[in-house]
Image (cartoon, coloured by chain):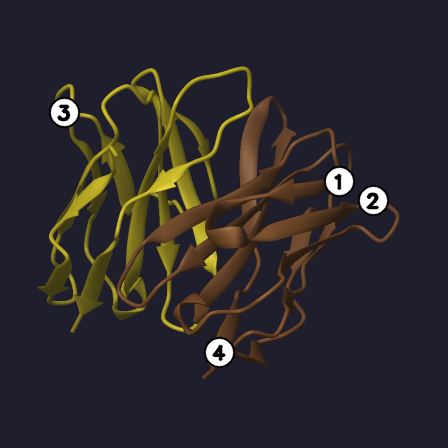
Chain colours: A brown, B yellow
């Protein structure tokens, strides 16, 4: 079954330190991978995507993610965390099945950046 | 920057009543989606809509649900005979047609509370 997993419910990091939010996937074929962020009382906001090409993709607000095919991972990273990065982060995978596109989200990881 | 809008932001309804959640997608987008997020749980795909018909739906999207694009701008989700377990955030999303390399733009969501 196609799925995506975010093994950490919450990640705490000190302001200024690097952060990593983990995501692994299980999809047959070539996946399209996405990261979204959700601030309180707001909708999901697109951060970045991997379709093909360079394994390291750069997105909004200084975030980047590394696609690792051998480890089936797509971890979200940022070199220096800001307090304003505190939010809920969702990994998602999109794939085609039966001629239609489907999307599956992870359960989300709450990022808490401590001043 | 264009954005997806949703109304109302919060809808309270009694069990058994019908509700209509409204969305205005980004004007040049052609694919439309509904997702829901039960409090504390992950985002779940409900349905996708293209060319005035449903292109894909999940097992959640049963006969209780329907979608419609009544005019050139609105995209609605109707929930008939609401149940307590329908209480959730409902997100609308839209995306432009492309060669498949697109991302979905999400609205801020409608919080549905069924009492």
Front residue (pair B20, B42): B42
Which one is in front in this view, the residue at disc 4 or the one at disc 3? 4
Q: Earlier in the sequence, mark 1 or mark 2?
A: 1
Q: Residue at x 39, y 22 (%)?
A: B96
**Chain identity of mark 1:** A
Q: Are marks 2 and 3 on the same chain?
A: no
Mark 1 vs mark 2: tell me if same chain. yes
Image marks 1 and 2: residues in contact by CB distance under 8 Å: yes
Numbered label attached to residue A69? 2
Name the disc covering residue B70, or none.
3
Determine which residue is flagged by label 4.
A112
B87 relative to A25, above or below: below
Mark 1 and mark 2: Cα distance apart in space: 9 Å
Per the model, the C-alpha gap separating discs 1 and 4 is 26 Å
Mark 4 closeness class: few <14, some 14–19, many ≥20 residues within 10 Å: many
Q: Chain of mark 4?
A: A
User: Distance between the Cα atoms at labels 1 and 3?
Assistant: 42 Å
The residue beneath circle 1 is A55
């Amino acid at each position: 079954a196609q799925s995506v997993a975010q093994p950490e419910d919450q990640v705490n990091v000190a302001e200024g330190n690097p952060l990593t939010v983990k995501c692994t996937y299980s999809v047959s074929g070539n996946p399209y991978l996405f990261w979204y962020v959700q601030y309180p009382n707001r909708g999901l906001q697109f951060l970045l995507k991997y379709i093909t090409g360079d394994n390291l993709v750069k997105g909004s607000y200084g975030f980047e993610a590394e696609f690792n095919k051998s480890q089936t991972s797509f971890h979200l990273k940022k070199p220096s965390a800001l307090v304003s990065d505190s939010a809920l982060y969702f990994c998602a995978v999109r794939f085609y099945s039966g001629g239609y596109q489907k999307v599956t989200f992870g359960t989300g990881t709450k990022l808490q950046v401590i001043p | 920057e264009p954005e997806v809008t949703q109304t109302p932001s919060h809808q309270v309804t009694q069990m058994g009543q019908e509700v209509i959640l409204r969305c205005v997608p980004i004007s040049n987008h052609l694919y439309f989606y509904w997702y829901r997020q039960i409090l504390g749980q992950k985002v779940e795909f409900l349905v996708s809509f293209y060319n005035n018909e449903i292109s894909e739906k999940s097992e959640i999207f049963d006969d209780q649900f329907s979608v419609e694009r009544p005019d050139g701008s609105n995209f609605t989700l109707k929930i008939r005979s609401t149940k307590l377990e329908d209480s959730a955030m409902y997100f609308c999303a839209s995306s432009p047609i492309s060669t498949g390399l697109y991302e979905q733009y999400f609205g801020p969501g409608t919080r549905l509370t069924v009492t």
